[in-house]
Image: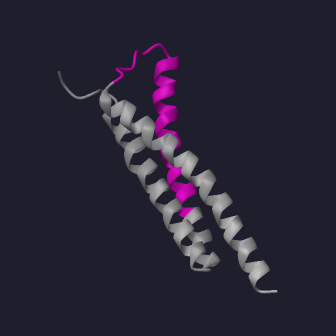
Amino acid sequence: MGEPANLEAIMGLIMHGGDAKGNAVEAIRAAKKGDFDAAASFLEKANHALNIAHKSQTALLAEEAAGQSIEVSLLMVHGQDHLMNAITFLDMAKETIDLYRRIEEIGGQ
């Protein structure tokens, strides 16, 4: 059994999804320290990585929609898992950063 034919797209999901989640984590850590400029920068990086991961997913979906069967491999599942975790984590990071910002505003009064 060889590699999936669409290994490049799958690896894009894994690498860029992981980067997006990692940057979202760093954004939360920066906000926790009160560094909201750094948090915004990490969120921007996370969004950029997520967009690249989405392009990889779109390439796979387009292949499937064109009638080209996609082999569901452990790598594919792992890639989709990375993407979904990144999306969820980025959403939670935005909410958490907003909470840290509100806490700082209340504490500064």
The quarter of the picture where the N terminus appears is top left
Q: In this view, does 96 lie above or below 29?
A: above
Which image quarter is the C terminus in? bottom right
Tell me what residue is drawn at x 64 percent, y 62 percent: 96
Q: In the image, 108: left or right of 42?
A: right
Q: Residue at x 55, y 74 (%)?
A: 30
Outermost residue toward the right in this view: 109
Q: In which quarter of the image is residue 81?
A: top left
Question: Any magenta on residue 77?
Answer: no
- Residue 51 on the magenta segment: yes
Between residue 86 and residue 67, name the one nearer to us.
86
Main secondary structure of the magenta stretch: helix
Look at the picture and state if 56 lies above or below 97: above
Q: How many labels does the image show?
A: 0
**Residue 76 appearing in the image:** yes
Q: Give the range drawn in magenta.
A: 44-72
Q: Which of 98 and 20 is in front in this view?
A: 98
Q: Residue at x 65, y 66 (%)?
A: 97
Quarter where residue 12 is shown: top left
In this rendering, is residue 46 above or below 106? above
Q: Where is residue 11 in the image (x, y as percent from the top left)?
A: 35, 41
Q: Residue at x 38, y 49 (%)?
A: 15
- Does residue 11 appear to the left or right of 109 in the view shown? left
Give the colour scheme shown. Answer: one colour
Residue at the farthest left position: 1
